[in-house]
Image (cartoon, rainbow, N blue to C red):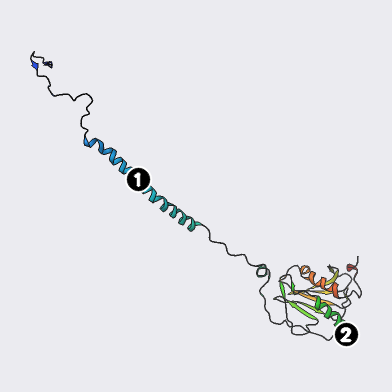
């Protein structure tokens, strides 16, 4: 078949393109460069996936280390009740006088000493220099308990305190409060240093021991009755 020639503007014909067309059903050779981007893309995706697999555990490790560094330290163990409620104190004997007692008061005082607690609130009992059968001491500075002595006579207008069914006559001194029973057969005197506030609270356990061992007696002030 003759291929028509193109006609130029000057009337002359241009020779027709005689290059053969590719046969139907036959694909022309692809440009090698055309497949390169797809190959590179697969290579890049593979490298990215590998980097992710490697980086993930590292990221988790860094996060764990950072959390451990920022987390508060384990709190110190709470002190045991005995450590937190007992004051530091001297174990040296407390100097106390021990006047001679008649047979009956001596018997009553021994009974009282056997009933006194080993601790009064957070004060532990300490040894005394004399008369352990009639004297006791607790804490540092020492709170002391002295049993025996002459019955005390107090003015009718003086204040008295009733603590756990025991009537006490208070005397305020510079460095302590002195409490003496006024309703017992044998007097008991308690000296409470100023550093121990609220003296009645310290007298409460002593009052309980007195009720259990020292009989009532003597002239009871009006303020203790009722």
As drawn, which residue projects farthest toward the bottom? 100
**On residue 48, which mark appears?**
1
Q: Position of residue 72 (x, y in %)?
A: 53, 58
Q: Position of residue 73 (x, y in %)?
A: 53, 61
Q: Does the residue at mark 2 contact the one at mark 1 (Cβ under 8 Å)?
A: no
Q: Tell me if residue 111 can be seen.
A: yes
Q: Residues within 10 Å of mark 1 (few under 14, many from 20)?
A: few
Quarter occupied by residue 199: bottom right
Give above or below for 93 relative to 71: below
Residue ID at (49%, 57%): 68
Residue ID at (81%, 75%): 115
Q: Which residue is mark 2?
A: 103
Image position of 71 (left or right of 4): right
Q: Residues within 10 Å of mark 2 (few under 14, many from 20)?
A: few
User: Gap between marks 2 and 1, in whole Å?
Assistant: 103 Å
Residue ID at (47%, 55%): 64
- Classify mark 2: helix, strand or loop: helix
The residue closer to the viewer here, 51 or 89, is: 51
Give above or below for 48 relative to 182: above
The residue closer to the viewer here, 148 or 12, is: 12
Quadrant (top left, top right, bottom left, bottom right) of the N terminus: top left
Quadrant (top left, top right, bottom left, bottom right) of the C terminus: bottom right
**On residue 16, which mark appears?**
none
- Classify mark 1: helix, strand or loop: helix
Give above or below for 154 relative to 11: below
Q: Position of residue 34 (x, y in %)?
A: 24, 35
């Amino acid at each position: 078949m003759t291929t028509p020639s193109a006609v130029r503007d000057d009337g002359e014909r241009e020779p027709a393109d005689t290059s053969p067309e590719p046969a139907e059903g036959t694909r022309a050779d692809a440009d090698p460069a055309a497949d390169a981007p797809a190959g590179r893309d697969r290579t890049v995706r593979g490298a990215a996936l590998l980097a992710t697999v490697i980086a993930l555990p590292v990221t988790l490790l860094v996060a764990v280390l950072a959390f451990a560094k920022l987390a508060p330290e384990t709190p110190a163990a709470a002190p045991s009740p005995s450590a937190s409620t007992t004051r530091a104190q001297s174990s040296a004997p407390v100097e106390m006088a021990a006047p001679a007692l008649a047979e009956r008061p001596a018997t009553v005082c021994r009974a009282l000493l056997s009933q006194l607690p080993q601790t009064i609130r957070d004060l532990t009992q300490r040894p005394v220099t004399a008369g352990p059968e009639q004297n006791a001491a607790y804490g540092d500075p020492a709170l002391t308990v002295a049993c025996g002595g002459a019955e005390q006579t107090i003015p009718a207008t003086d204040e008295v305190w009733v603590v756990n069914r025991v009537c006490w006559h208070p005397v305020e001194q510079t460095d302590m409060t002195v409490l003496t029973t006024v309703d017992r057969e044998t007097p008991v005197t308690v000296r409470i240093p100023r550093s121990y506030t609220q003296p009645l609270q310290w007298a409460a356990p002593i009052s309980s021991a007195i009720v259990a061992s020292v009989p009532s007696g003597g002239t009871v002030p009006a303020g203790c009755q009722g």
